[in-house]
Structure formats: C-alpha cells, structure tokens
Amino acid sequence: MKGYAHVYDRKHINTDEIIPARYLNMDKEADLAKHAMEDLDGDFINKVKQGDFIVAGEDFGCGSSREHAVWALRGSGIKAVIADTFARIFYRNCINNGFLAIESKDISKKVRTGDELEIALESGTLKNLTNGEEYTFLPIPAFARKIILAGGLINYIKNEAK
Amino acid sequence: MGSTITEKILAGHCGKESIKPGSLINADIDLIMCHDITTTPAIDMLAANGMNKVFDPEKIVVMPDHFVPNKDIKSAELVKKIRLWAKEQGITKFYDIGNHGVCHALLPEQGYVKPGMTIICGDSHTCTHGALGAFSTGIGSTDLAAALYTGQLWFKVPETILIKLDGRLQKGTYSKDVILDIISKIGVDGALYKAMEFTGELIDDLSVESRMTICNMAIEAGGKSGIISPDQKTIDYVKERTDEEFEIIKSDDDAVYERIIEIDVSNLEPIIAFPHLPGNGKPISKVGNIKIDQAYLGSCTNGRIEDLRVAASIMNGKKVADGTRMIVVPATTEIWKQANKEGLLDIFMEAGAAVSTPTCGACLGGHMGVLAAGERCISSTNRNFVGRMGSPESEVYLSSPATVASSAIEGKIADPRKYLI
C-alpha cells in the first residue's frame, strides 16, 4: 500500500481536534469528512487526497471515544494513520473498522509531509520512497489482523457465526 | 501470586479461574449504557447487517444526555431515532427528558452500577463506574454494536498501575485536585492501555461520589479503566439504590502491579489544569492573575450534589463578578431536585449565576455555554483540549467546584480556601 504523508509532529492529537464535538450531531462519514482535522489544520481537507496517510506523534487519538474520528479521516481519503503511539480507544476503533493504525517509534521525526511511503504489512516494514529510508513497525496483533482482514468487527462476528 | 480486582473481574466474565495481563479475552458484558452521540451509528450497523435483536434488553440502559434537551434539528433526529429503537427493542430503562441526566452521574445514582460488574458505554468517561468496584470502560460505536448484539466484547487484559494515596486533604482541596495532580505527574498518556487502581488512606476517607471524580478522569491519563476495591461505603451506596445481589471482589494483597505510585496528599494545594491538556496542572499559588469570562459548574466529573453543596457554601451571599458569567448544571434530575430542596439553586441564582437543566452541554462545546474566540472559562469538567468548549481560540482551565465558585466571585482564577472557614 502506497500513499503520501501528511505529518503532524505533535503529541496528544485528540479526537476533539480530529472531529470537533460541534459536528457530532451528524453520524455519516461523508458529512464528518468535511470537518476532518478542522481544529488542528483548517486547510487539511483541501490538501488531502484519496489514499494519503497521516503521520503523527505519540498518543494519537486521545480523548473522547467518538468513532466519528476514524470515519472523518477515512471519509477524507486517509487510508492509514502511522503514529509513534496511539491512544487506546482510537486504536480499538481503527481495528474494529478495518482501518490501518500503525505504530512506529519516532516516525513523526523521520518522515516529512509529501514523502511517499509504502506499507508492507507482512514484513512489518515501512519504506520511504522519497528518501530511500526504511523503518520497522510493531506487528499488528494476530487477533486484530483477523478483524482487519474481515473488514471490521461486525463482519468478523458475522463470519464467526457462520 | 495474587490477582488484581481487574484481573479477577475479567477472569470471572470469560469463564476462567485466573487471567494474566496481555491475554486476549472475549468477556461477558453485564451492563451497556447508550447515549445520543455514539448509539445511532451502532443502530445503523446492526440494521445494515440483519442483526435485528439486541442480546438482552434488560441489560441495556439508554439515556440521551449530550445534546439534550435537543440543541438543534440534527440532534433532535438522533435522539428520536434512539427513542424509537429502544421502544422497538423492548428496552424499558430509558431516561427521557424529565428524568434525564448526564449518563455517568445517572447510572450509579439509579442503582445500575454494582461491584464486580463489567460495564461498557460508547463514551470515554465510562471509567467513572470503577469507583464502585466494577470493570467499566469506554468503547466506540462498532464495539457498542457488537456488544449489543452478542453480549460480549474482546479485551486485552490490562496491566494495573496501583496509585496509593495517603494523608488527609487540607480544607479547600478535593478529589478533583488529587486526580489533576496525578495526571500532571504521570502525563496524559502515563497510564496508556492500563487499569488505574486507587487505594490508600485518602480513598478510605473519600465519599463514593468523590471517588467517582477520580475514576472519571482515569482516561485523561490514557487509562483503560479506573477502579477502587469496594468497601463498606461502596456497599452502603449500592444497597441504598438496589435490592439486587452483587459480589464483592477485591485485589489480593500479593497482586502483581505494573508499577506502584505513592502520593501523599497532605500538602496538596488546589490544582488548576492550564490549556490545552488535563496534565498541565499548577498549584493555585503559582497561577498568577488570570481573568475569566465564564465559570462552569457541572459534568460527569463534578456535577453531583456534594459538588453543588461546596460551591454554594462559597457563593452564599456573594455575587458573580461583573463581566463574568456563571453556569451551573446539576448532572441529573434527582440532583437538580435535591439542590432545589436544599436551597442551593437559590444561592446560585441570587449570586447571578444561571442554572440549567441537566446536560453534557458546554462541557464538550455542544450548547448551553459555548465559548467565543479569546474567551476563558474555569470549569469543573474533565477536558481542556483546543476547542473543547467552543472556539478553537478559547481557553479552558480545569479545577474543583470550589475553585470554580471562588473564581466566579472574583472574576479571575482564585483560591477557594479563603472562603472556607
């Protein structure tokens, strides 16, 4: 999977910044996507292209449990978030949606906005095609992988029931 | 080798004798709470997948609270959808306007929370209920849908951090100051993925409501849950509210902890968390002159009756400063009625504050007190992220209810201790 990086080199980017609560009177991905990252980067929605990645610092997605944060990002075109570390509920929500959340130490210091990255899930490596560097990431736990491959938790439960 | 309360509760809910941190389990869920923000997506997911019946309507409690009374047409539609769904599913524990309240205040108040339970809600502050010795954690809408349908949910058993709180609080400092101090010490991700277990002399001293304030903010340190082993106070609180039986589960003396943090609260001052993180706490003596536009008293953290009593005792006969506005939001209908009976609401209104009906409201920038650009608010709530209570250019300072009250009187962040004799 290849994509271009939008780097936010900051810790504790919270779900209020990813999708402000004033938009939680809506629950459809397309509506939420228009306001993705609005309170952190008002221009994000104009810059993001289908298939791009977000690269961020530690504790990405902390705060509220709103899954709207995952939907807003996915709806905006983002295919994966790569962060130094993730907050717990956001990480769960990513797995449950079959959305890639990849943890790679200090990644926010190594990648620049506009770099083209390639994620190789099997080998657990991340290639920076722009500068030729290669990084490793924590393997996605087997159970989480099963959910992601099923296309999310609801599909997984349906498959299990069969 | 012993087990923590969290390990014991989770083991008991997946049919095991004992369980180690790091294990992946599918746990039975005893209680699911649903509110207006995160439930409608779950309803849609269930409908789209032909999952037409919830696993057990008796184990589900529904309480719209975030944008109620409906703040606009869109939120009215969300609440309407939940109301119809609950009826269709035969869920009778529905707290509509007139019986409404902020979910984490209402759930224990109405006797649903019992020691030893597993509880989930699509809300990060679900960790509150650990104050009664339950495993209680916040999840998203997909998790909610899965649990509503199957009655189970996957968890990685968390390691536990034991926080041992000794000493006695001085006058004018409260459990809110303690938890703001803890988060400032360990950081907003200091307990990432972990259970935070609180114990010690201070916990023994605190009321069950004050303990809720501490567990409520476990998520602000990144914790999966906050928990306190039940004692006689817990048992009395629960028995006053329900006749249902429950099991008392406590941590073993030789339980294994990821780490143990010892804090003596004897010299703790009132703490103010500066924008824009709950971990930016400073003692009041180091705060300086910070003018405020709004003082907000309410929320699942500090909108309970004891919070209103403390604030009213400070504001009795005083006035909110010129140029400052104060908003008081009792967290539940019962709390509102009790505060009214005790004359607390009169005290607030005589002081020039506005008293609202229960709602999450402005705590998350919804309605009933949203901030404009450049405005500052001192708030008894739990989060002060950028834009949390309104404009991304506004500022939120977190404190105890007492500090909210003293600050309202002075129009700037003020030490409550001089008002308490």
Image: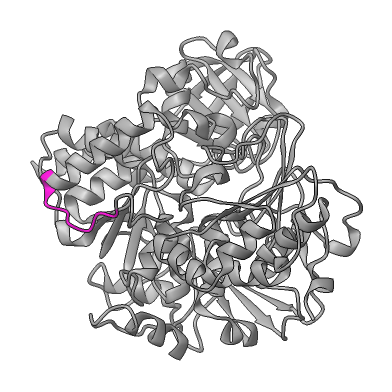
Q: Does B214 appear above or below B222?
A: below
Instruction: Give the magenta-colored segment's residue range.
Output: B88-95
Q: Position of residue A105 (x, y in %)?
A: 64, 39
Q: Report the predominant secondary structure element of the magenta stretch.
A: loop
Q: How many marks?
A: 0
Identify which residue, B294 or B113, lies in the foreground: B294
Query: Residue B333: within the magenta?
Result: no
* Residue B333, x across and y down, in percent: 40, 60
| Residue A62 visible in image | no
Q: Position of residue A123 (x, y in %)?
A: 46, 32
Q: Residue at x 40, y 30 (%)?
A: A99
Residue B147: % across, % down? 25, 51
Colouring scheme, one of rainbow, by chain, secondary structure, one colour: one colour
Q: On screen, A96 above or below A44?
A: below
Q: Using the image as rendered, state which of residue B230 and residue B323 is in the foreground.
A: B323
B311 w.r.t. A102: above or below: below
Figure quadrant of the N terminus of chain B: bottom left
- Of the 4 image quadrants, the one containing the C terminus of chain B is bottom right
Residue B11 occupies quadrant: bottom left
Closer to us: B236 or A151: B236
